[in-house]
Amino acid sequence: MSETIRLTTGQAVVRFLAAQFSERDGAEQRLIPGMWGIFGHGNVAGVGQALLQAAHTGEADLPYYLARNEQAMVHTSAAFAKMRDRLATFACTASTGPGSTNMITGAALATTNRLPVLLLPSDMFATRYPDPVLQQLEDTRGGDVTVNDAFRPVSKYFDRITRPEQLIPAALAAMRVLTDPAETGAVTLCLPQDVQAEAFDWPVEFFRHRVWHVPRPAPEPAAVARAAEVLRTAHRPLVVAGGGAVYSGAGNELAALADATGVPVADTHAGKGALPADHPCAVGGIGSTGTAAANALAADADVVLGIGTRYSDFTTASHTVFGNPEVTFVNLNVARLDAVKHSAVAVTADAREGLRALLAELDGWRVDDSYRDRAGQLAAEWRRVTEECYSRGHGPLPAQTEVIGAVSEAAGERGVVINAAGSMPGDLQMLWRARDPKAYNVEYAYSCMGYEVAAGVGTKMAAADREVFVLVGDGSYLMLSSELVTMISEGIKVVIVLVQNHGFASIGSLSEELGSQRFGTAYRYRSGESGLLDGEALPVDLAANAASLGATVLRAGSVAELRDALAEARANTTTTVVHVDADLFGPGPPGSGWWDVPVAEVSELTSTSKAYENYAANKQNQRHYL
C-alpha cells in the first residue's frame, strides 16, 4: 500500500494547493500563492483551521489574506491573474450561504474575461443530519440543491465534494482547467462544512510538488497557409489585437508582423498595449468606443486579422464597424470558439506561435505605401485629438478627459491604470496610450462596477515594482470600496483617483441619447415638487469616507491641483486617495462607433420617439458577417 497521512479535508486542501506550480517557456511559479477568505460558519473550523495550523507548523506554505468583501476578493484574484498572464491566481474561501453567494458576481467576471480563479464556497451538511441549518435553501425539487448551484453557469468547472476522497479527482481537474489557456475561468469546488472537518487517510503522493505545464498549441501548417493566402489578397487589411495577444506574450511577434507588412493594428480593451501606442502601425482602440482612426480603417478593411479577440459587441460596434460588404476574417485564437467567429479562416493556436508561423508564411508581402501612409495620417490626427481632450481648459470643474490626461502624465512609462465601469472605460479606450501590455487593466468583458479598488490590490501584489493608479467614479466607489482597508492592512501602496460627479455619467449620457432624459442617473434628493430624484445634490463626502477607512486623502479642485496631488501621491509610500470633482456633463472625446441598445418602439415621450428614429436608422448598418 502507498504511504498515507491522516488529515481533515480542509487540511488536505491547503497542503495540495501549496504544492501546485505552473510552468511556461521554462519559467516555473506558484500557481496558487495564497488564499483570500472571510470566515464564518462553514469554513471557520474547516479550511480556516487548516490555514491556521499550516501557519503555525509550517506544514504548508499557503499565506492567508483577509478580504472585507467576498465579491472583492474574487476581483482581486482575477486582477492578479491578469497581471500574471493567467499563470498564477489565488484561492478564495467563504462561509456557508451569503458569504459564498457573494462570490458569484466575481466568478462571472472571471469566466467572462477568461481569467483563472479558484473558489471554495462552503456548503451545507453532506450528512444532512441537522437540516435545515442556518442560511440553507430548502428546494422542493430536490434535496441535493443548495444556493451554491448558482455557481454552475458562471464556472468553467464545478464540483461538490460530499466525501473526502472525492477531493482527489476534483482538485486535479480544477488545476487542469485553471491552467488551460482555452478553457480557463472560475473553478468552483463546493466544500460542505462537515466534510471540511472530516478526517481521511490521504495518499502522500497527492501532496507532491506538481508542475502544470501551460501549453502553447502550435498552428496547423495548412491553416497557416490558408490564412496567409487570404492576407496576401488584401489591399486594406487591419489587425485587431485582443487579450490573447497579451496573455501569450506575443508583443514582439506582433510588432515584427507590423514592421514587416505595414498592416495597421487596432486593439480591444484586453489587447491594449500588445503593440505599444507609439508604434508607427498602432491606430488605437476599435469599435463602439474606438478611435476615429481605427474605425475609419475598419469601415474599409477587406481582410481583418483577429488575434486573441472574442469580438464582443463593443469591438464590432454591434456588427457595424466592419463596413466592407466583402470583408473576410482571419482569426488566430487558442480557443476554437473564437477562432471560427464571423465565418473566419481559422488558425487555432497560441497567439505567439501562430504569429511566428504567419510571419514566415507572409515573407516578402507588404501593404501598399499609400495605405500605410493613410493609416499613419489617421493615427496622427487622433493623437492631436487626444492632446486636445487632455488639455481642454474646461471649467469651472474639469472634464473627465482632463482628469485622464493628468493621470496619464503621472503614470509615466510603467504606471498601470485600472478601471471597469461608467464612462471612463470608453474615454480610456480612445485616449489612453499604453506603453506595454501590462500598463492597462480596464475590465470590459463584464464591466463590473466595484472591480476597481479590489483590482488595485491584486494588480499591485502581482507587480510590486509598478505604480498602480485606480480610476474610479463615485458610483462604483460607493458599491465596493471596502478593499481600501485591505490595502492599508497589507501595506499595499496604490494611488486611487476618485472622480466625484454626483451621478452616473455613462448611463446618464446613454439615457439621454436613448430618449430617457437621464432618468435615475444622478445622486439627488427626492424633490417634493416633482416627486422624482431631481432635487439638490446630496452632501456626500467620499474623501472623508476614504480618510475614515485609513487612507491618506488629497483633494483637488482643478487640473493643476490634480497634477500636484498625483505627484505627491506617487511620492507617498502608503495608499493615497486623490479626490477630484469633475463635470458630470463635461465633453468627452468624439465618438465614431455605435452600440446596439434597443429603444422603446412606441412612446408618449417625444425624446424617446426621436431616439427610436435614430436607432432604426443605425440598425440598417448592422449585419451578420457570413
Image (cartoon, grey):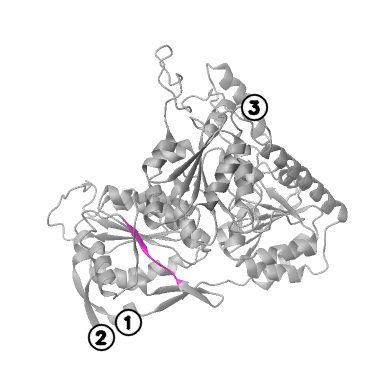
Mark 2 sits on what residue? Answer: 3
Q: CA distance from mark 1 to mark 3?
A: 65 Å
Left/right of residue 451 with respect to residue 395 in the rendered view: left
Inspect the image, locate mark 3, and give the three-letter code of the amino acid beneath it.
Asn
Residue 611 pos. (x, y %): 60, 24
| Residue 221 vertical position relative to residue 581 in the rendered view, above or below | below
| Residue 11 vertical position relative to residue 335 in the rendered view, above or below | below
Q: Secondary structure at mark 3?
A: helix
Inspect the image, locate mark 2, and give the three-letter code of the amino acid beneath it.
Glu
Mark 3 sits on what residue? Answer: 614
Please tell me whether mark 3 or mark 2 is closer to you in this view. 2
Q: Quadrant of residue 176?
A: bottom left
Crowd around label 1: few <14 · some 14–19 · many ≥20 (10 Å): few
Query: Could you say which disc has been placed on residue 205 in the image?
Result: 1
**What is the span of residues highlighted in magenta in the rendered image?**
30-37
Q: Secondary structure at mark 2?
A: loop
Q: Are marks 1 and 3 in contact (CB under 8 Å)?
A: no
